[in-house]
Amino acid sequence: MKGPATTLRFGVNYTPRRGWFHSWQDFDPAAAAEDLAQIAGLGLDHVRVFHLWPLLQPNRSLIRPRGVEQLVKLVDLAAEQGLDVLVDGVQGHLSSFDFYPEWTRAWHHRNIFTEPGAIAAQAELLRTLGQALAGRPNLIGLQLGNELNNLVRDNPATPQQIDSYLDTLLAATREGLAADPRGLLALHSAYDAAWYGDDHPFTPEASARKGDLTVVHPWVMSGNCATLYGPRSPQVLHLAEYGVELAKAYAEDADRLVWVQETGAPEPLIPAADAPNFARRTLRGAADCTGVWGVTWWCSHDVDRALADYPELEYSLGLFDSAGRPKPVAQALAETVSELRAAPDEPEDRGTALVLDCTPSTRSVCCPGGAYFDAWMRLRRDGVRPAVVLAERAEDDKHLATRGITHLLRS
């Protein structure tokens, strides 16, 4: 599965319709199969799935066999619908809620990024999941967890400590998957602070150089993008494209693929009437970049309003509402996927690049509202398809030639 992509992949992050992720406590295969059939009906080819860390590993030395079996069952149910699956392992954060096992909290508090026992336990969980899942013909791979950098607030760490943490967990993931000869993906993901946050310990270099491809989650709420520029603005409609190009700038391997793994249309930032166009433009923007593995929409089903205390936008992100009815954004997504498969875009290299000159302490220039972001978006609005080049590589003729860059601009 590694190497240049031949076909763009299109999928969705699976959120169970009944009970959200709390449904793992009363796992219902029939309900999951119904949800997955709805997803497959849109013509999507994969899902990303999540268990909850406390339910999988309630004690540092206990990984529940029943929890692992449920996860494997979900992967098999997806196979029955023709869907491939990426599994996320350590679910400490989902949709504004943090999920810690009790052995990491209160009197037992352990910094999950720096304490050796906590790191070893997470490594063992990922190794166990890999061993259980390896050999499933529809398995794409295993990701460390969903946006683990959301947990930095309560688990402070340096960039060096985070790098060591990621290296340890990726190695364990590969050990778990080693029995499968297909070269399944071992990945990690971070929310946008990794790219935009000054001195954030999860760095762009870690995202672009660790794991088997680069994962980006270009959200319209990051940096208040949709609020600053408006839901129909070029800044919003080209945000995923920008995220891909920013990620490619930090990669050491010019052929390294980028996965737009989370993007969505949260109300009221993207009004429901604008969501179909946002979906079309987002998919086509990503397809206009070279080296894209695929796009995975967040998410499959709305959170049911019977569940309390979610941020308002979390109730509106699904392709299907909480009764299982497809929304207009689902139709737009399905139609665009069908069009792109029937007549795939063949993007050309981006010959013009905007030079990015920043330090870890000034990374916010890349954030919506930042000087670099605005300069890139002005070019895009004017019809240029700009790449991104780091200032330290601006004189590297070999690097520029490999990426097909012939003209540099400075903001």
Image: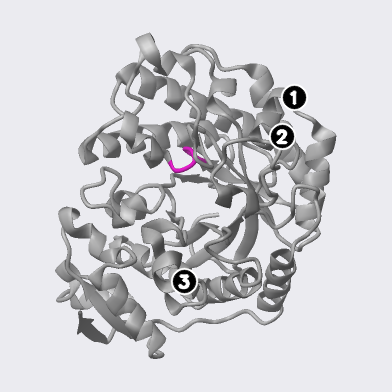
Q: Read off the magenta span.
A: 143-147
Residue 148 found in image quarter = top left
Q: Earlier in the sequence, mark 2 or mark 1?
A: 2
> Any mark on residue 400, and which?
none
Residue at 57% x, 58% y is 266
CA gap, disc 3 and disc 1 = 39 Å
Q: Earlier in the sequence, mark 3 or mark 1?
A: 1
Callout 2 crowding tier (Cα within 10 Å): few <14, some 14–19, many ≥20: some
Q: Is residue 287 left or right of residue 302?
A: left
Q: Can residue 291 be seen by looking at this rendering? A: no
Please tell me how many numbered marks the rendered image carries.
3
Q: In this rendering, is residue 137 above or below 105? A: below
Q: Identify the amino acid type marked 3.
A: Val
**Rendered location of residue 354, percent (x, y):** 26, 78
Q: SS at mark 3?
A: helix
* Residue on which the image places disc 1: 26
The reply to whether callout 3 and callout 2 are in contact (CB within 8 Å) is no
CA gap, disc 3 and disc 2 = 31 Å
Residue at 80% x, 30% y is 28
Q: SS at mark 1?
A: helix
Residue at 74% x, 53% y is 321
Nearest the viewer among 167 and 37 is: 37
Q: Is residue 411 magenta?
A: no
Nearest the viewer among 250 and 357 is: 357
**Rendered location of residue 112, percent (x, y):** 36, 26
Q: Main secondary structure of the magenta part?
A: loop
* Residue on which the image places disc 3: 236
Q: Earlier in the sequence, mark 3 or mark 2?
A: 2
The reply to whether callout 2 and callout 1 are in contact (CB within 8 Å) is yes
* Residue on which the image places disc 2: 19
**Rendered location of residue 211, percent (x, y):** 41, 47
Q: Identify the amino acid type marked 2.
A: Gly
